[in-house]
Image: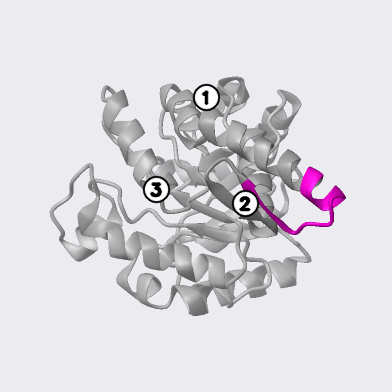
Amino acid sequence: MLYVPGNRSEWVRKAAKYGADAVVIDFEDSVPDEEVPAAREALAENAQALRDAGQSIIVLRPNEVQRGGLLDVAAAAAAPAVDLLMVPKSTVDVIKVVDRTLDELGCELPLLPIIETPEAMVTAYELGRASRRNIGFWAGSGARNGDPHRFLGFDWSVEGQETLFLRSKLLLDARANGFEHIIGGAWVDLDDKDGLCKHVESYRVLGYTGYVAIHPGQVEPIHETLRPSEEEIAYAREAIETMRRAEQQGQGAIRMGSDMIDYATVRMAERVLALAER
C-alpha cells in the first residue's frame, strides 16, 4: 500500500505507475488542516484519474472522526473509484460511528481499522467485530516515531523485539475475526533499504500479508520481501503434485523427501502459491 498526500493531485494521479497493490490517498498526517477541504473536493476526480491510469485498489485514509473525519467519509462515499476506507484512531465506538454514517449514506465501502492507540490494541478483537464492513487491520505498531511508539514509550529497534508481543496479538485478533488482510509498517528512513527489508521481514515471518510504503522507492523492496522465496514456491508445487499422485493411490499422507505431508501441507502450499502470484 503506497501512501500519497491527498492534497497533491499531481502525485495522486501518477501513483499507479509505481506498482503498489493499493494506493492510499491520505487526508490525515500528510495534509495540512487548511488544505483538507480542497483535497476533499478533488477526491472523486483524483480517484477516478488514478483508476483510469490502471490502479486496481484505491483507499482513502480520512482524518480521525474527532477532527472532521466524517466529512471525509462522506466524500469517499461519493467517490465511485474509492474501494476501501481506512479508519484512523479506531476504537469500537469510532468504528460504529463510521459504520452508521455509511449506512445513512447508503454506501457499502469496506473498512480497514488502523490499530494505533492503547485502547485499540487492548480491544482489537472486539473492534474487529464492531462492523460487518471490517476486512482486516493496519497494525502500525512497529513504526519508529509513529503513534504507538509515542503512546507506549518503548525503545524502538529494527529487530522489533519490543513490539513482538503487540504485533503477534494483533495478528491473532485479526485471524480470530477471520480477516485475511493484516498490514504492517511503516519505515521512515528512505535511504536505508536494508533496514526496510529487515523490518518488512519481521512482519512477514509472523504472518502479516502487507506493509505500508510511504515513498514510491519502497514499493519494490516491500514486494520482494513479502514474496515467498523460490525454495518455498518450489516446495509448495512439489507438495501439491506429490499429494495429487498420493490421492491416485488412495493415500491421504505420504513421505516427500524427509517430510511427511498431508492435506494440511497442501492447504499451506496453496496459500504460498497464492502469495507468490499477487
x 42%, y 65%: residue: 170
Compared to 263, does 256 lie above or below? above
User: Residue 219: horizontal and vertical position, in percent?
Assistant: 48, 28
Q: Residue furthest right?
A: 248
Tell me the amino acid under the disc marked 2: Met
User: Residue 215: horizontal and vertical position, in percent?
Assistant: 41, 28
- The tag earlier along the polypeptide, 3 or 1, is 1
Q: Which mark is residue 268?
A: 2
Residue 81 magenta: no
Tell me the amino acid under the disc marked 3: Tyr
User: Residue 147: horizontal and vertical position, in percent?
Assistant: 29, 56
Residue 248 magenta: yes
Residue located beneath label 1 in the image = 11
User: Residue 278: horizontal and vertical position, in percent?
Assistant: 65, 35
x 60%, y 54%: residue: 85
Residue located beneath label 3 in the image = 203
Q: Nearer the viewer, mark 2 or mark 1?
A: 2
Compared to 49, does 1 lie above or below? below
The 10 Å Cα crowd at callout 3, few under 14, some 14 to 19, many 20 or more, is many
What are the residue bounds of the magenta stretch? 245-255
Residue 26 makes an appearance in the image: yes
x 57%, y 47%: residue: 60
